[in-house]
Amino acid sequence: MARTRAVAAAGARLFDETLALERRLRERRSDAAGEIARRLARAREEIALWRQYDYLIVNRDLKEAAEQLTAIIVAERSRASRLALGLPDLPLPQQGGS
């Protein structure tokens, strides 16, 4: 699937408001101004493309965002298309008759 990227191969992306991200990066004082500008530009690009992702998590509250990400991972692991066929407790119809 062309639009699938990132976490759990499901296109989940964590977004934060750009201003909050900028404030956090500047308060941390661990990145040069150029690196902060690069990261902010990348965040803006990702936010502009949010409709292309399968999931959207807005990181306003860390606990809530982590819970949403966990739910996405569990759901993706449970997708029928990801499960191997022939489960011992699930009889499958025989192919080709009889």
Image: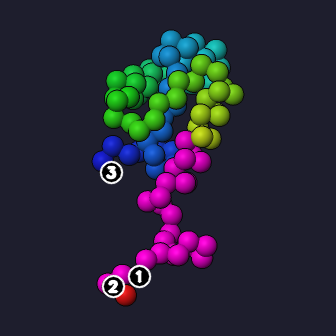
Q: Position of residue 34 (x, y in %)?
A: 46, 22
The amino acid type, in three-letter code, at marker 2 is Gly
Looking at the image, residue 4 sits to the left or right of residue 92; the answer is left
Which residue is painted at 65% across and 27% down in the image? 64
Q: Closer to the N terminus: mark 1 or mark 3? A: 3
Identify whether 46 is placed above or below 87: above
Identify whether 57 is placed above or below 85: above
Identify whether 87 is placed above or below 70: below
**Quarter of the picture holding the C terminus:** bottom left
Which residue is painted at 52% across and 29% down in the image? 57
Residue 33 in view, yes or no: no
Q: Closer to the N terminus: mark 3 or mark 2? A: 3
Q: Whole-Å distance between the Cαs marked 1 and 2?
A: 7 Å
CB contact under 8 Å: marks 1 and 2: yes
Looking at the image, residue 94 sits to the left or right of residue 96; the answer is right
In this view, the residue in front, 22 or 96, is 96
Secondary structure under the numbered disc 2 in the rendered image = loop
Q: Residue furthest front?
A: 98
Quarter location, residue 66 = top right
CB contact under 8 Å: marks 1 and 3: no
Secondary structure under the numbered disc 3 in the rendered image = loop
Q: Position of residue 60 (x, y in %)?
A: 59, 19
Q: Which residue is mark 2?
A: 97
Label 3 Cα neighbours within 10 Å, binned few <14 / some 14-19 / many ≥20: few
Q: Which residue is mark 3?
A: 1
Looking at the image, residue 28 sits to the left or right of residue 6; the answer is right
Magenta stretch, main secondary structure class? loop
Q: Whole-Å distance between the Cαs marked 1 and 3?
A: 30 Å
Q: Which residue is mark 1?
A: 94
Secondary structure under the numbered disc 1 in the rendered image = loop
* Residue range highlighted in magenta: 72-96
